[in-house]
Amino acid sequence: MPEPITEQAERVLALWQGSWVAAFAVGILVWGLIIWSVIFHRKRSEQLPPQVRYNLPIEALYTVLPIVVIAVLFYFTARDQTYLLETDEPADVNIHVNAFQWSWQFVYEGEEDVNGHDVSVAGIPGEDPQLVIPNDSVVHFDLESPDVIHSFWIPAFLFKMDVIPGHPNEFQVRVNPDVEGTFAGRCAELCGVDHSRMLFTVKVVSPEEYQAWLEHQKQNPEALPEPVPAEQPAVSPSPAAGEEGQADTAADAATGEQTGDDTDAPDTEAGSEQQEARQPDAAERAEEEADHS
């Protein structure tokens, strides 16, 4: 299991370790009883051992002991789950996470750049985004998705949360003060053909380095791509290509007007010939009717 870098991750690790201790304790008890029965209660003669139909103390023990074990595990699980989902503590950094097929966008809420927009970092084809956060700080995450279900997972957090369209989720962590470095992040929910490429990195720095990075981003905002839907290509055509296409369309339209070529126009000559061909037939029928009369 990765080394935890947040207080919440340390709580998860403690719960995981405690669950293993409880599982081993129960396992040792059960295995011990089985081995004891095999060794000390082997068949020694043809004499039938005493048959006991009911033993209330043992049956009560078999019933109560599992209930106690499950209740203890449930208590610690519910307690830690409530702690992990708490978002009441004032946050030092608020980050809005947009998960889209197939990358991420991180918006630092309340941190406006020179253009009046919130500082943000987004992934582009061939380049994973990097999430920068300070240590010894409370970081709040708001999660949203415009397309399908994703899952925001940073293994060093020992925690992940689904990103569901139309259902914003949130959580917050307190980053440990002695942590610095770069950590992996990824989508943990199968979300399409390029799910495996939906990666990002998390860089944890000191608060001073974080403020310096944030000021640099404010003064040097980058043009970030919008989330690209799955059915559209990731790279949009260049303006020059668009102008050439418009010019070709205009040229084709002008050529059609000049030549007067219209393949959908009705053939009036053919219609006239058919009408003339039908007129003799009508005259012949009139003559036949006069002869009969």
Image (tube, helix red, strand yellow):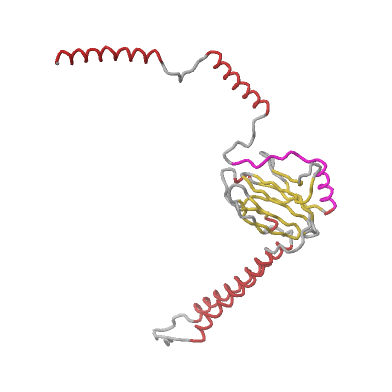
Indicate yes or no whether the magenta region holds residue 93: no
Q: Residue at x 30, y 13 (%)?
A: 277
Magenta part of the chain: 208-229
Q: Nearer the viewer, residue 291 or 92?
A: 291
Please identify the residue farthest to the left as the structure is shown: 292
Coordinates of residue 153 in the picture (x, y in percent):
65, 54
Left or right: 2, with 74 as reference point:
right
Quadrant in the rendering for residue 229: top right
Residue at the (77%, 60%) spot, across then down: 176
Describe residue 267's horizontal placement relative to residue 94 as left or right. left
Residue 127 percent location from the top left of the image: 69, 40
User: Which residue is rendered at x = 56% and y = 13% of the image?
Assistant: 258
Tally the marks.
0
Quarter-of-image position of residue 138: bottom right
Residue 235: image x %, image y %?
Answer: 64, 34
Asked if 176 appears above or below 184 in the picture, the reply is below
